[in-house]
Amino acid sequence: MDPFGQLGADLSPSELRETAYEILVGACRSSGSGRRLTYVSSSNSKERSQQQSLTQKSAASKVKKALGLKPKKKKKSGGEDESGDPDRKRGGGTLGELMRVQMRISGQTDSRVRRGFLRVAAGQLGRRIESMVLPLELLQHFRSSDFTSEQEYEAWQRRNLKILEAGLLIHPHLPLDKSLTAPQRLRHILHSASEKPIDMGKHSESMQALCNAVTSLACRSFDGSTSDICHWADGIPLNLHLYRILIEACFDVNDETSVVEEVDDVLDQVKKTWVILGIDQVYHNLCFLWVLLHQYIATGETENDLLFAADHMMVEVVKDANSIHDPEYLKILASTLSLILDWAEKKLSQYHNFFYRVNIDVMQSVLSLGVSAARILMDISHEYGKKRKEVDVACSRVDAYIRSSARNTFSQEREKLIASRKSSKNQQSHLPLLCILAQNICDMAFNEKDIYSPVLKRWHPHATGVAVATLHACYAKELKKFVTNISELNPEAIQVLLAAEKLEKDLVEMAVADSLDSEDGGKATIQEMAPYEAQAVITNLVKSWIQTRLDRLREWVDRNLQQEDWNPLVNKGRFAPSAVEVLRIVDETLEAFFLLPIPMHPVLLPELIGGLDKCLQKYILKAKSGCGSRISFVPPLPALTRCATGSKFMAFKRKDRSLTGPGRKSQVCSRDGDDLFSVPRQCLRMNTLFNIRKELENLERRIMFNLKNSGIAHDENTADSNFGLTIASSMEGIRELSEAIAYKIVFHDLSYVLGDYLYLGEVSSSRIEPFLQELEQNLEIISVTVHDRVRTRVIIDVMKASIEGFLLVLLAGGPSRAFSVQDALIIDEDLKFLTDLFWSNGDGLPADVIDKFSATVKGVLSLFQTATEDLVEQFKHVTLGNNGISAKSRPPLPPTTGQWSATDPNTILRVLCCRNDKMASKFLKKTYDLPKKT
């Protein structure tokens, strides 16, 4: 990792270090005005003696203070410094000695270098250091005798020649003109020296050739004239490599993580090399920045002060970058900052892995370095003519870091949970993986807000919002895959979806809170967070669950009603087994629904109850179907005829059987075993409907109780949570079944003692007693079988049917029934017997109810007591008067309305039709030509 580029010369780090030290000694020797080499601090304008103790200097360091570096602790007893190294002693040492030690130069080498510069000074009295080519001067003044061995001398000679090659041929200060011959001559000399050492005698031919070539190349200027300044070590990047070595002397050789206390003096000495190396403050700042950061990285990133110092140095580099437009500088700057940016981004793109609450200040410095580098690099690209996008570099970079680190952290957390689940697969875990992940992500988001966002907000105003939006999106992908694989509602699915909903709520709240001061109020962030729609998914799953349960229930209703035989001996006649089962299923379905760990019970409850309601309604409709009705049991009225004594009554005759007299066997229980619509079975159906209604009321109370226990208040949704259709259908079914039972008993089961017997032939010999006996047995069955809450309704319907049947016998009994005025007393007495049966000495129906329903028949009986002549006149009056026809005209045939009364013309006409009287027969024959049937 080197921002300055390759030298292209075969120079080892130690060779470069020795060259840098020679330059440092030469620069300091020059500043000493020809005297013996001394080291003078620029912090004090007065020259100090060579032996001045460094420990007498002020402990305060301006450089350390400027860079934010903490001063080292005082020495421990026994002469040890803070590092505990007893060999590291400063007392009485000179700055020159310190530099030698810091640059790892041996004492022998140092002595030789000093001797060499004394010789150079003796021969070049008054000549400035920048006007000399130091390697060339040293080559002329050293002999093999100055070295411990010939090999050492040759190695030293080769090193200086390679330095000349690097500084004059490979990286010259000025580009080499192709017309120059000096470069070729120098290359030839260097090539010869590589094969065998050359004679470096001051007056030797080879030395003269070398001097001429080197001087010719080093003393060039931009205008082509000969310069007094020699350029042999100021070509980029050779000068930067040498200067970096000098800057590195600031770090304690015994503790590479710390800067020496004498850093101010060290830097003062190093800066004296600027004139040789072509360095200025701008290049110094850049090199110092890189050396500080590189030292921090090379020492394992343990000393944060070095990082903080690099961050402080970056401030100066930013200032320089804004004011310097030199292409060479910008090239080195771009190379250096690219390396810094790459290093910073490796950490920042995964900042959750590197930074925590205890070292968050480190993250701030890394961010500062990375953002500053990115900004300068953007400016440099613009400087080079690249199109610059109008974008906030810092904000966009930090945005990318947040998203990258959040995604990386999410993936790590997910993989960790998966690995943990696999390693403990034998242990049962109560929570699904995505539930645990949701909680962990929520914790991560709060940590982000608490630990990282305060740092990130310096460059991104909505750092928290970006982080939570990224985590939200990451979890959304996992949730989507999970939801795709859900085939039916199950506890795990609900747990995961509810956990996702909670996570989303927390994340959205954090994003909104983070964006309150933004221009759009956080809309952009919120729009980025596509809703999980967990509620919708749960709702759809629950709806599917509901639909499955309802489909099963409907199928069950269809199958089991076909098998139901309505046995009145089962469940004491209160409930059909199929009804017991269907209510059990409904109850279990509701209980299972409320056990679902979902928050939207009130929203989905109406849908569930609506479906159950329709299933129950279907059960009721099927249960009562085929049971008949009033219309199906009441026979059609026969055609109007004149009565004929001795004719047979056919109005109530059944087509499937012959008529029998009142001695025929009772029909009450004769077919109960094989008739699905017998009275006891009909009563069981009715009881079943009543008990369904009653149980549904209990179910509704339990539903409200469950809602209250769930902390759900009564609202519009729960108000609709009732079995309205079923209750209405059950009430209507009870009414229809009650009426069907009544009319079946009267017009079907007891027709043989009513329509087929009552008043047939002689009135006095075919009275109502047989009918009442059979009817009483049926009433006893009803009293025992029918639920007491609906028993009265059924008995009233039986009374209504009986009275209606009684009236039909009188008014539509056909030509085989004939009544005289004297028969009215018998009929009236029979009516009293009928009503007394229902009154039952006060234990039956209330008298007012009986009077209400028998009023019509009593009115009609008054017509039976009326003389024929009066009936004819009354009929003419009612018929002609109502139609506005004159008395001489023929009255029209009145229509049959079924609303029997003493004033109804059709009722009067029917009384005349069954009047056993010649006057009546003659009137009917003359007026309407009614036939007489025999």
Image (tube, rainbow, N blue to C red):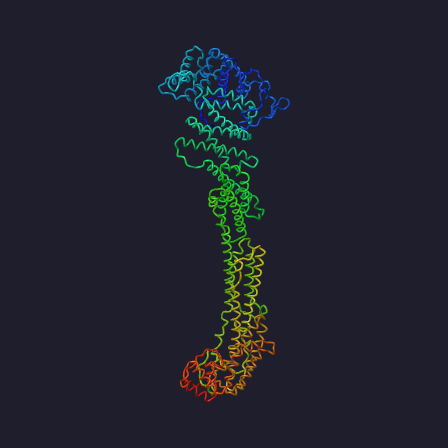
Residue 859 at x, y percent in the picture: 51, 81
- Res. 752 visible in picture: no
Residue 670: x %, y % from top left: 54, 76
Front-most of residues 63 and 697: 63
Q: Quadrant of the C terminus?
A: bottom left
The percent coordinates of residue 422 (x first, y second) are: 55, 44
- Residue 924 x/y as whole percent: 43, 86
User: Looking at the image, is 775 positioned above or below residue 578?
Assistant: below
Give the left or right position of residue 191, taking residue 534 as reference: left
Q: In this view, does 793 lie above or below 499?
A: below
- Which of these two is toward me, 463 or 619? 463
Residue 213 against residue 590 in the figure, above or below:
above
Q: In which quarter of the image is residue 787?
A: bottom right
Point 49% across, 29% down: residue: 315
Left or right of 722: which side holds 173? Answer: left
Farthest left residue in view: 179
Seen in the picture, residue 252 relative to 652 is either above or below; the reply is above
Question: From where the camera sits, is residue 800 visible?
Answer: yes
Which is more toward the observer, 324 or 403? Answer: 324
Residue at figure coordinates x 59%, y 73% from the top left: 784
Question: How many marks are shown on the rendered structure?
Answer: 0
Compare residues 69 and 14 and report the one nearer the observer: 69
